[in-house]
Image (tube, rainbow, N blue to C red):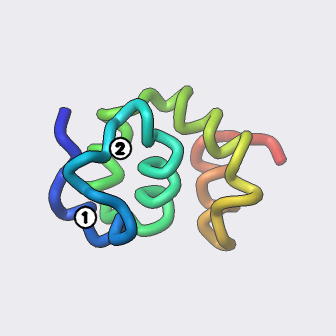
């Protein structure tokens, strides 16, 4: 599965062509949860399981996601604070 080109502005400090879905999953999940459109969020949930995204929010959300994104995703994914 290729990363949509519409996401390239979220990764300006990276070589977009070299991003890897598995190796760079933490960064990809973080950026799309913060900045993604509905279509990009749909892609995210197709590329990664809801469980994997939920685990990312549980483990890294407090540190990586600003408010109100953090609270929104904690509610949507039923992640306990």
Residue at horizontal 68%, vertical 53%? 61
Q: Observer-nearest residue: 6 or 15?
A: 15
Give the percent coordinates (x, y) of residue 69.
Answer: 60, 66
* Image x and y of residue 9, in percent: 28, 71
Residue 40: give x, y in percent of width and height: 28, 55
Residue shown at the point (65%, 45%) measured from the top left = 57
Above or below, 21 against 41 in this view is: above
Please say if 50 is above or below 24.
above
Marks 2 & 1, CB-CB < 8 Å contact: no
**Residue 25: % across, % down:** 45, 39
Q: Circle 2 is placed at which residue position?
A: 44
User: Quick check: 56 left or right of 18?
Assistant: right
Q: Please tell me which residue is depicted at 34% across the width and 36% down the height of the picture.
A: 21
For the residue pair 73 and 3, the one nearer the viewer reads as 3
Side of 78 where 2 appears, left or right: left
Q: CA distance from mark 2 to mark 1?
A: 14 Å
10 Å crowding of disc 1: few (<14), some (14-19), many (20+): some
Q: Name the N-terminal-most of marks 2 and 1.
A: 1
Report the number of numbered marks. 2
- At numbered mark 2, what does the secondary structure look like: helix, strand or loop? helix
Image side of residue 77 versus residue 2, left or right: right
Callout 2 environment at 10 Å: few (<14), some (14 to 19), or many (20+)?
many
The residue at the point 31 percent across, 64 percent down is 37
In the displayed structure, 67 sits above or below 18; it is below
Residue for badge 1:
8
Of circles 2 and 1, the one toward us is: 1
User: Helix, strand, or loop for circle 1?
Assistant: helix
The disc label shown at residue 17, or none: none
* Screen quadrant of the N terminus: top left
């Amino acid at each position: 599965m290729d990363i949509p080109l519409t996401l390239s502005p979220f990764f300006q400090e990276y070589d977009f062509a070299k991003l890897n879905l598995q190796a760079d999953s933490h960064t990809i999940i973080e950026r799309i949860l913060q900045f993604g459109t509905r279509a990009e969020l749909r892609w995210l949930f197709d590329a990664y399981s809801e469980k994997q995204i939920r685990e990312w929010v549980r483990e890294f959300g407090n540190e990586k996601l600003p408010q109100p994104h953090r609270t929104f995703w904690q509610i949507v994914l039923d992640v306990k604070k």
